Amino acid sequence: MKVLMVLTSHDQLGNTGKKTGFWLEELAAPFYVFKEAGAEITLASPKGGQPPLDPKSDEPMFQTELTRRFNADEPAKAQLARTVRLDSVNQADFDTVFYPGGHGPMWDLAEDPNSIRLIESFIAAGKTIALVCHAPGTLHRVKKPDGTPFVAGRTVTGFTNGEEEAVGLTKVVPFLVEDELLNLGATFSKVKDWGVHTVVDGQLITGQNPASSGPTASVLLEALRKQGK
């Protein structure tokens, strides 16, 4: 089983002067779900090399057993330091793609032509894809063959308006994930703020927030196993 994980290369939190990037738990938890299933994992980002970590995600209150495991895992950290460039990635080489969140993807992956084409190519190939937290926002430019939004008519989840409000960034992010997906014609499913929630709609799997990232990867893994991967 070959799994591609796509991370952000964006490190500026809007015009706040603060840093952002990918959220550590949303990489670490799925990474070990896939690793323990024996999957071959490739990490990619728009610029390649070391992607920026949201420093907040490594603060003590947000650390988990799996983030600590990742931080102590020298081979995993070495792999993270040399992510492949997104424009070099071919969908045909992978069984699936998983997008961790963090606020970074809202700026780069959401608008990146290579990311948009990549997701569309996975969809066209009939492969199951998964995105968690802010990463479902990267679907907002993804289209069906007829030019309509991919998420239109689908049930999805992602970082909610309430969660964005709780972290005080509703006026900083380029758009709100929940509002944007609703505007594109999706049905937005959610549970209480910070609750674990995953949604499966055909070949699309989404998770609501950091705590949902490991469960989302597990749901994706189960779907791949049913497909004989």
Image (cartoon, rainbow, N blue to C red):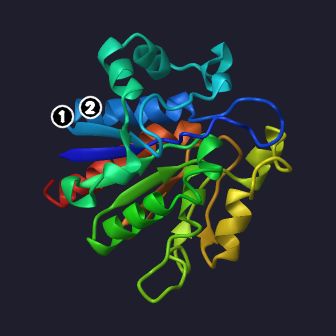
Residue 195 showing in the rendered view: no
* Residue positioned 84% across, 36% down in the render: 16
Q: Are marks 2 and 1 in contact (CB under 8 Å)?
A: yes
* Dot 1: element: loop
Rendered position, 66 above or below 170? above
Query: Residue 101, percent across and down?
Result: 56, 43
* Residue positioned 67% across, 33% down in the render: 20
Q: Amino acid at mark 2?
A: Lys
Query: Residue 168, percent across and down?
Result: 84, 40
**Residue 182 relative to residue 136: left or right:** right
According to the image, label 2 marks what residue?
A: 35
Q: Quadrant of residue 74?
A: top left
According to the image, label 1 marks what residue?
A: 38
Q: Nearest the camera: 110 or 183?
A: 110
Query: Residue 194, percent across and down?
Result: 66, 40
* Residue positioned 32% across, 50% down in the render: 88
* Separation (CA) of disc 2 from disc 1: 5 Å
Q: Nearest the camera: 167 or 171?
A: 171
Category of crowding for the residue at label 1, using alpha-carbon neighbours closer than 10 angstroms: few (below 14), some (14–19), many (at least 20) = few
